[in-house]
Amino acid sequence: MNVKSLLTALCNPARTLAVGSLLLAAHAGQAQNSFNVWEAKPVTKPEPAARPARKAAPAAAPLVAPAATPAPAFAPAAAPAPNNAQSLSKARRKTQDSLQVAKGYSMTLRRGLGERLRRNRYSKADSAYYMFTWQHLHYPSAALHAGLAGQVMVRLNVSPAGDVTNSEVTGTSIQQESQADKGASAAAGKEAMQRSAKELLWRLRFEPASGATQEEIPVRYVLQ
């Protein structure tokens, strides 16, 4: 449609409406075509979210074999087995001591007692002797009335079995330490002290030995 025709149409209302409609339709089709055009573009996939990195497992400690215990340079000596003979001997001695004490005798004493007493060498083994004399020493009344005190030395013959077979007084050291009672005899008092010392030591018992021995033992009388 040229300009002339357009002007002619504008002069004619009916035509003008038709032409306007035609123009609108043309523009609408052009617009529709512009909307119907679709350009295919590659779809971009969203990148996946980054996963947190896994923590590395802790390294296992290296296995170390336990150090081998060194073998001892020498084996410890085994404890000696108890000697049945010694145990039996001790049991018999204990029984014998009980019987001796019941009969008024001493417990079994070590030989060499007299020498240890003279040198004032006390030993635990001699405690039985001191206990025996403390319990059985008799202070004669004749010596007490005469006011006598002192020491009597007695020699004992001891058999291999340990029994006293003989006793004799080898010396005395007796003096008057208190006023004597009227009529008291010093001689009678001394004799009584010697006899009492011999009777006391006669009841001593010693350990067995291969042969007979002698013991020279002092007996002391002290006024309190």
Image (cartoon, helix red, strand yellow):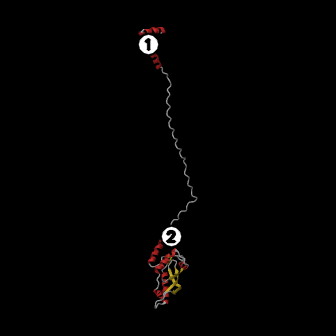
Residue 104 percent coordinates (x, y): 45, 79
The answer to whether residue 94 of the structure is visible from this angle is yes
The answer to whether residue 2 of the structure is visible from this angle is no
Kindly identify which residue carries mark 1: 20
Kindly identify which residue carries mark 2: 86
Residue 42 higher or lower than 100, as above or below: above
Left-right relation of 210 to 141: right
Residue 222 percent coordinates (x, y): 49, 83
Residue 124 higher or lower than 195, as above or below: above
Q: Does dot 1 land on a helix, a strand or a loop? A: helix
Outermost residue to the right: 73
Residue 99 higher or lower than 144, as above or below: above
Q: Earlier in the sequence, mark 1 or mark 2?
A: 1
Query: What residue sits 49% from the left and 69% below the top?
Result: 87
Q: The disc labelled 1 sits on which kind of residue? A: Gly
Residue nearest the observer in this picture, 31 or 48: 31
Q: The disc labelled 2 sits on which kind of residue? A: Gln
